Image (cartoon, helix red, strand yellow):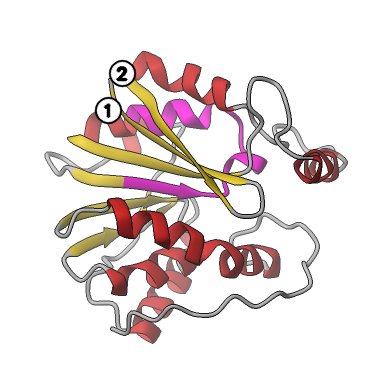
Amino acid sequence: MSAEILPFVDEPRPAIDPHPLSDYVAWAGRRNRNPILEVFQQRFPSAGDVLELASGAGLHINYFAPHFPGLTFQPSDLTEEVFAAIKAKRAERGNANVLDPVRIDLTDPATFRFGDRKFDALFVINIFQVAPVAINEGIAALAARVLKDEGRVYIYGPFKVDGRYTTDSNRAFDQEILAANVPEWGLKDVRDLEAAAKPHGIVLKETIERPANNFILVFGRQ
């Protein structure tokens, strides 16, 4: 298990494709992994359990895991098609602290099968551009069930704030996504995510700016 910090490489962006095994998702993961890792290194506990939602091909969880030898990482995804990719990346990096992936459907609480198990942190990366705001209700419902009292939920991505774009580049990115005419695609507003989470007793604690006009939204118990 090698805790490398791989260098940033400025690569041409592939066409937008949200499929978890696409070239676009891999490209985005290589660009944002270090800015996200920097925040996690400041905030994750030295020991405990971490759950990733929408793990996709397992690029992020298997990149982060070697940097936290005292933590156990639980990958998950809606689509079992990606489980082989997660396991292959785990084997490639020798990550003994990454568990087998489990299926979680954020619209179906019946898939939140963790029993009495509690997590110190949950995180999800780049899901809301191609998912409904209602997914945050599922994230909050899951967090209310499985998050430790002082645990945190970390949501990374580009967002609007109070109905406004934070940069012209985010406006252009949103217009590009919306041009695909796929229902629920497009940048979401931080306030709408807050509203979806609040009925579950999960509230926004902090907003952390990251490079390329992205944020990490940090949620926790009320």
Is 146 drawn above or below residue 127 in the view shown? above
Q: Is residue 148 visible?
A: no
In the image, is residue 131 part of the stretch drawn in magenta? Answer: yes
Residue 19 relative to residue 194: left or right: right
Residue 142 percent coordinates (x, y): 32, 33
Query: Amino acid type of disc 2?
Result: Gly
Where disc 1 sits, the SS reads helix
Q: Which residue is mark 2?
A: 201
Query: Quadrant of residue 178 in the image?
Result: top right
Whole-percent x, y for residue 115 in the image:
15, 40
- Give how far across and how far down residue 49 sits, in percent: 20, 54
Find the residue positioned furthest to the right.
179
**SS under mark 2:** loop
Q: Is residue 35 left or right of residue 187?
A: left
Residue where numbered disc 1 is placed: 144
Q: Quadrant of residue 162?
A: top right
Going by the image, does 9 lie left or right of 70?
right
Image mark count? 2
Q: Which residues are magenta?
A: 122-141
Task: Say what amino acid the circle numbered 1 marks.
Answer: Ala
Q: Residues within 10 Å of mark 2 (few under 14, many from 20)?
A: few
Q: Is the Cβ of the residue at disc 1 closer than 8 Å to that at disc 2? A: yes
Q: Where does the N terminus fall, quadrant-wise? A: bottom left
Q: Does the magenta portion include 181?
A: no
User: Between residues 44 and 137, which one lies in front from this camera angle?
Assistant: 44
Which residue sits furthest top?
A: 199
| Crowd tier of the residue under label 1, counting other residues whose Cα lies within 10 Å: few below 14, some 14–19, many 20 or above | some
167 to 59, vertically: above or below: above
